[in-house]
Image (cartoon, grey):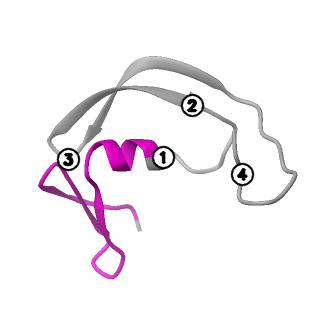
């Protein structure tokens, strides 16, 4: 898994497909499971695939034309 720091490594595994529900949308995706503190992070590949736009100030994300509230 790539990390933000240079030379850092993190082990994990790919599982799936698993069901991911965001608002009223349901996705079947393969996911990378890693030992992180966050409940879930959406990768750039997922965001691009579903045409995501992110409103940082409003804490919302638009996926496939539907708005989802992001965690605070």
Of the 4 image quadrants, the one containing the N terminus is top right
Q: Is residue 25 visible?
A: yes
Q: Secondary structure at mark 1?
A: loop
Q: Where does the magenta region start and end?
A: 45-71
Q: CA distance from mark 1 to mark 4?
A: 12 Å
- Tell me which residue sits at (39%, 61%) in the image: 71
Judging by the rendered image, the residue that carries numbered circle 2 is 32
Judging by the rendered image, the residue that carries numbered circle 1 is 43
Viewer-nearest residue: 57 or 72: 57
Judging by the rendered image, the residue that carries numbered circle 3 is 23
User: Circles 2 and 1: CB distance less than 8 Å?
Assistant: yes
Above-or-below relation of 45 to 57 = above
Q: Secondary structure at mark 4?
A: loop
- Residue at the limit of the structure toward the bottom, as seen here: 57
Q: How many marks?
A: 4
The first of marks 4 and 3 along the sequence is 4
- Whether the magenta-drawn stretch holds residue 56 is answered as yes
Viewer-nearest residue: 55 or 7: 7
Q: Is residue 42 visible?
A: no
């Amino acid at each position: 898994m790539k990390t933000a720091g240079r030379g850092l490594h993190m082990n994990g595994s790919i599982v799936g497909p698993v069901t991911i529900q965001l608002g009223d949308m349901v996705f079947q995706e393969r996911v990378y499971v890693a030992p992180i503190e966050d409940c879930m992070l959406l990768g750039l590949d997922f965001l691009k695939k579903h045409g995501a736009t992110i409103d940082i100030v409003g804490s919302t994300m638009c996926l496939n034309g539907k708005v989802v509230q992001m965690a605070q």
